[in-house]
Image: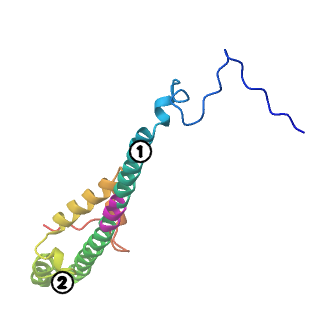
């Protein structure tokens, strides 16, 4: 038969059990307490939730700004395109372009999106530059926004 191990001698002490206080009294013993683990877990979950929420908010703002920037590019391109057409007519008949030029430059008469009614080309250009520099270090050069075939800006004045 197998013999049972000898009982510890009177001077020896039994090793501490896992749930006893003597096992938790070491340098990092405070970390193994249930309340401490609860607090550390709560902090970790809160920080990860904050990070996730902040990331999603940033992505939503970026998508909204990109959509607005696309609309600004379209509005800017259409208005400059109209001026390009007037520029080609002005080469043939300079006196007959004054009336249509006033209509083309009127921000209340010609617009693509209702959001941009009453806004001049300078207003649209300012907002475009603001949104571009918000997410990039430098704005897109003006020639990248001009319609194809336009080699220099048209002076609206």
In this rendered view, identify the residue nearer to me: 141 or 50. 50
The quadrant in which residue 88 appears is bottom left
Could you tell me if residue 108 is visible in this image?
Answer: yes
Q: Is residue 98 above or below residue 140?
A: below
Which quarter of the figure is the C terminus placed in?
Answer: bottom left
- Bin the neighbour count of mark 2 within 10 Å (Cα to Cα): few under 14, some 14-19, many 20 and up: few
Q: Which residue occupies 37% across, 74% down?
A: 149
Q: Which residue occupies 28% across, 73% down?
A: 71
Q: Secondary structure at mark 1?
A: helix
Coordinates of residue 116 in the picture (x, y in percent) = 17, 74
Coordinates of residue 138 in the picture (x, y in percent) = 34, 51
Q: Is residue 43 above or below residue 88?
A: above
Coordinates of residue 53 in the picture (x, y in percent) = 35, 57
Q: Which mark is residue 38?
A: 1
Cα gap from disc 2 to disc 1, whole angstroms:
82 Å
* Marks 2 and 1 close (CB-CB < 8 Å): no
Q: Most prominent secondary structure in the magenta stretch?
A: helix
The quadrant in which residue 92 appears is bottom left
User: With 16 as the anchor, is 49 left or right in this view?
Assistant: left
Coordinates of residue 33 in the picture (x, y in percent) = 46, 37
| Number of numbered discs | 2
Which quarter of the figure is the N terminus placed in?
Answer: top right
Magenta-drawn segment: 57-64
Q: Which residue occupies 32% across, 60% down?
A: 57
The quadrant in which residue 106 appears is bottom left
Q: Is residue 136 above or below residue 116?
A: above
Residue at numbered disc 2 = 93
Image colouring: rainbow
């Amino acid at each position: 038969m197998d013999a049972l191990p000898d009982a510890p001698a009177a001077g020896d002490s039994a090793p501490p059990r896992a749930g006893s206080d003597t096992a938790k009294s070491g340098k990092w013993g405070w970390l193994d307490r249930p309340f401490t683990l609860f607090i550390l877990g709560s902090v970790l979950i809160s920080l990860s939730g904050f990070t996730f929420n902040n990331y999603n908010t940033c992505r939503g703002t970026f998508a909204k700004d990109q959509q607005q920037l696309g609309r600004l590019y379209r509005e800017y391109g259409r208005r400059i395109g109209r001026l390009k057409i007037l520029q080609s007519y002005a080469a043939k008949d300079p006196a007959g372009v004054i009336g249509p030029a006033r209509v083309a430059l009127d921000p209340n008469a010609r617009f693509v999106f209702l959001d941009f009614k009453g806004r001049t080309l300078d207003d649209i250009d300012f907002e475009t530059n603001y949104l571009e520099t918000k997410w990039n270090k430098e704005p897109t050069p003006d020639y990248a926004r001009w319609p194809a075939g336009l080699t220099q800006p048209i002076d609206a004045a």
